[in-house]
Amino acid sequence: MVINSEFFMNLALKEAWKYQGLTYPNPAVGCCVVSENETILSVEAHKKSGLPHAEVEALKSAYIKLTNDSKIQTLTNSADIHKYLIKNHNDIFKNCSVYTTLEPCSHIGKTPSCADLLCSLGVKKVYVGALDANPEASCGNEKLLNANIEVQNGILQNECQELLYPFDRWSENKFVCFKWAQRLNGTYDDGIITSKESRKNVHDMRDKCDLLVIGGETVRVDRPTLDARLVDGKSPDILIYSRQKEFDKTIPLFEVKNRKVIISDKLDIIDDYKNIMIEGGANMFEATCDIVDRYLCYIAPKVGGSKVFQTNMEEFEILNILQDDKDIIMWLK
Amino acid sequence: MVINSEFFMNLALKEAWKYQGLTYPNPAVGCCVVSENETILSVEAHKKSGLPHAEVEALKSAYIKLTNDSKIQTLTNSADIHKYLIKNHNDIFKNCSVYTTLEPCSHIGKTPSCADLLCSLGVKKVYVGALDANPEASCGNEKLLNANIEVQNGILQNECQELLYPFDRWSENKFVCFKWAQRLNGTYDDGIITSKESRKNVHDMRDKCDLLVIGGETVRVDRPTLDARLVDGKSPDILIYSRQKEFDKTIPLFEVKNRKVIISDKLDIIDDYKNIMIEGGANMFEATCDIVDRYLCYIAPKVGGSKVFQTNMEEFEILNILQDDKDIIMWLK
């Protein structure tokens, strides 16, 4: 194994993928801080909109590792962490390098600018994966260079662009993800398939998306709730994709508050939303594959069931594999 | 992400799993060397019997990183690397820590003792995953302690024991692995399924095992060669598990030199072998599941075929997931 820039960027990438989809409307970003002699000081990711950016999380962890000053630990607000670091850094970062999957942001939005923070702390070098195409946030590199911080672009650029893709899509227009859960032998019928941890992850995705698309047959047979109760999250609006418009309104999904339920035999309504998740089996897959940007597949290491995920899509490319306590969570394109 | 002893041991573990099964008759072992300030100097694994042990590979790489003396690069023989390191180390390892998934060997076998090497180099501390139960090789820790090297046992012990399990089995008696390849939707019929890199890995496994078990139907239908040509390896003996004893002898597997082909409706013959791989589909799986120690599953991210890997085995535990260029290589129990 070679321990080089790609290795450190890959750590940042893997950490960021854990939160893919969950950072909406922000991008998934990972960051790794290393010392002068390439000791890994921290690897962190942006976890959720409103929480600190990856760079801030990573600089906070690195600060604790370098100083043993754990007073910063209790700070969760990004502006507070910025202030604390700027006041107390004492030049400890001056020989550190920062690997970030995305060019540090230059604008002051919900949180202060990461580029400004890196400049204030006077880090030595920033390795950037993907450049920021967002005109509001870009120019991060320019700020760094003006503050005499070395910048090296293009470390695992393709992989970092791939990580950024959902953000690019929902920023420009909309992002559509097709999610399914299956056993190792490809089946997806016959009761609960995945572990509780996987289902929590699905609920977390539902909490972040604004429209959930589901097939009429699934609604009739499974009588689902389609909320985000396992993570105390909000319930997305629902599009029931169905030719038949009549549904038994005692099916739990209709009783969830603060959500709109649309029943339609067309998918046009998704154009009104930004972050859309389709949940379903092979039929829904076939019906929607023309509008899907990425696939999210949960695989339980089990055999059983009888209905196989058989589609006309012949080949996928694996973008990321994550192993939770029991299952595999895989992003595909 | 927490950067601690478990993190470093996990790097060693992941590297070692890449060579699981390929180190026969030796155990799969990984090793990570870190400096005083916890900079990762190297992560290496034992790759093949006769090649240097993981500790030697890792110390060699760490030496190059610390000294830029690349003369050692050309040395591949373990004894030569030992000699070179002992002569030239100049105490550069005196503050280094070594994470090894298995207690360093104490005996002089095909290669000199790793424990002796660690003592000669005077490393500071050795973190050990699993203890060595092999009476010939054990006492590594004792040697280290006698040389005033700190030893900490039990880092990711269960995971390291799991890595060691095939070795434990073939050392005590025999190790039986069931291998299958499938698409994402669980099918395994209809032509070549996995990528060339996955098939090379299978050939590498065949080269290392001494008996390959295959079903009679597969032999008749697929007319396979069942050799290790993709890695220029040796061809294992074959047990065709079949009630019907007559086979067309122009099927390529019969024409491979230096191999025995046994045709039997019993599996008893496997007791004469140490490292056995069964290749097959759902029927062979059912017929052999009582004697299988571990499962090796190749998943191509494709959909297609029609014959599904449907068995009575209900649940697996994922031991390791490796992503090659296209596919997933997964060890299960």
Image (spheres, coloured by chain):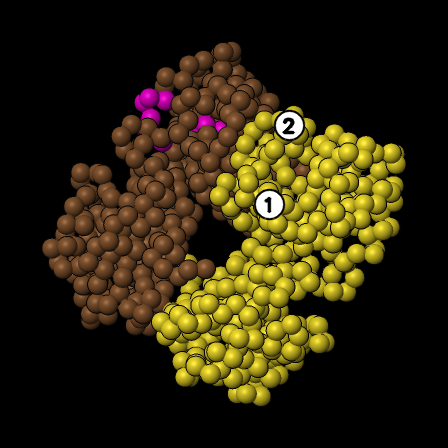
Chain colours: A brown, B yellow
Q: Which residue is mark 1?
A: B230
Residue B36 in which image quadrant:
bottom left
- Name which residue type carries label 1: Leu
Report the mark closest to the observer, 1 or 2: 1
Residue B86 visible (yes or no): yes
Which element type, helix, strand or loop, lies under badge 2? loop
Q: Residue at x 32, y 45 (%)?
A: A157
Q: Is A259 positioned to the left or the right of B302 in the image?
A: left
User: Where is residue B79, by image quadrant?
Assistant: bottom right
x, y percent for residue A94: 21, 67
Name the chain letter of the residue that bears numbered label 1: B
Q: Position of residue B177 (x, y in %)?
A: 71, 50
Is residue A44 at least partly visible in the picture? no
Q: Magenta stretch containing residue B46, yes or no?
A: no
- Residue of label 2: B190
Q: CA distance from mark 1 to mark 2?
A: 21 Å
Is A4 positioned to the left or the right of A107 in the image? Answer: right
Near mark 1 (Cα within 10 A), the count class, few <14, some 14-19 or many ≥20, is: some
The span picked out in magenta is A270-280
Subunit bearing disc 2:
B
- 1 or 2: tag closer to the N-terminus: 2
Q: Residues within 10 Å of mark 2 (few under 14, many from 20)?
A: few
Q: Residue furthest left?
A: A146
Relative height, residue B58 to residue B195 (above, below)? below
Work out whether disc 1 and disc 2 sit on a shared chain. yes
Q: Quadrant of the N terminus of chain A?
A: bottom left
Examine the image and state in which quarter residue A110 appears: top left
Could you tell me which residue is drawn at 51 percent across and 74 percent down? B81
Q: SS of the residue at dot 1?
A: helix
Q: Is residue A275 magenta?
A: yes
- Residue visible at 41% across and 72% down? B71
Whether B215 is drawn above or below A90: the answer is above
